[in-house]
Image (cartoon, rainbow, N blue to C red):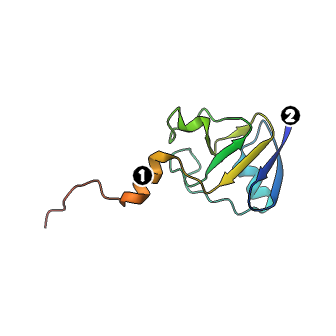
Amino acid sequence: MTEYTIEFVGTGETITCTDKETILSRCLEEGIAQEYSCRVGMCLACSAEILEGEVTQPAARGLTEEEAETYALTCMARPQSDLKLDRGKYPPSIEGDLAGGASDGAVADD
C-alpha cells in the first residue's frame, strides 16, 4: 500500500491518502469540509480539478473519459501519485448546465 500527499490549492489543506482509499473518505476522516452528495460517482458535487498528479476512478460514471483525465470525483478517486487538486471546480458538462439553469426545455402542462 502506497501513501500519497494531496494538496488542496488555495486552502492550505494537505492530507495523506493511500492508493486503497478514496480522497473523500480521507477528507472526512481529517475533518476537511469536502462537498459531496451521492458518494457513487454520479452527482459531481465532489468534483475537483486535477492540477498535478494522477488518480484512478473507474466507477466515476458522471464524467466523460475526457473529463476524467482532468477532473476527479473525490468519492471515487484513489491517488496514483502525489496530487494538487482544486476543489469545487466542475467539468464543462456540468458548468454548461449551471450556466443555463436546470431547464431541459420541457414545458409543464397545466
| Residue depicted at x 19% and y 62% | 108
Disc 2 or 1, which lies upstream in sequence? 2
Quadrant of the snapshot with the C terminus: bottom left
Q: Is residue 42 above or below residue 35?
A: above
Residue 37 in which image quadrant: bottom right
Left or right of 106? Residue 22 is: right
Residue 31 in which image quadrant: bottom right
Name, please, the residue furthest toward the left.
110
Q: Mark 2 points at which residue?
A: 2
Left or right of 110? Residue 33 is: right
Q: Give how far across and how far down residue 4 sits, in percent.
A: 84, 40
Label 1: state its secondary structure: helix
Label 2: state its secondary structure: loop
User: What amino acid is labelled 2 in the image?
Assistant: Thr
Quadrant of the snapshot with the N terminus: top right
Q: Give how far across and how far down residue 26 sits, in percent.
A: 77, 51
Circle 1 packing at 10 Å, graded few (<14), some (14-19), many (20+), is: few
User: What amino acid is labelled 1 in the image?
Assistant: Gly
Distance of mark 2 from mark 1, alpha carbons? 37 Å
Question: Front-most of 25 and 107?
Answer: 107
Name, please, the residue furthest toward the bottom.
110
Q: Give how far across and how far down residue 28 sits, in percent.
A: 74, 57
| Residue depicted at x 73% and y 50% | 25
Q: Is residue 49 above or below residue 32?
A: above
Q: Name the residue under label 1.
A: 96
Q: Give how far across and how far down residue 95 sits, in percent.
A: 47, 53
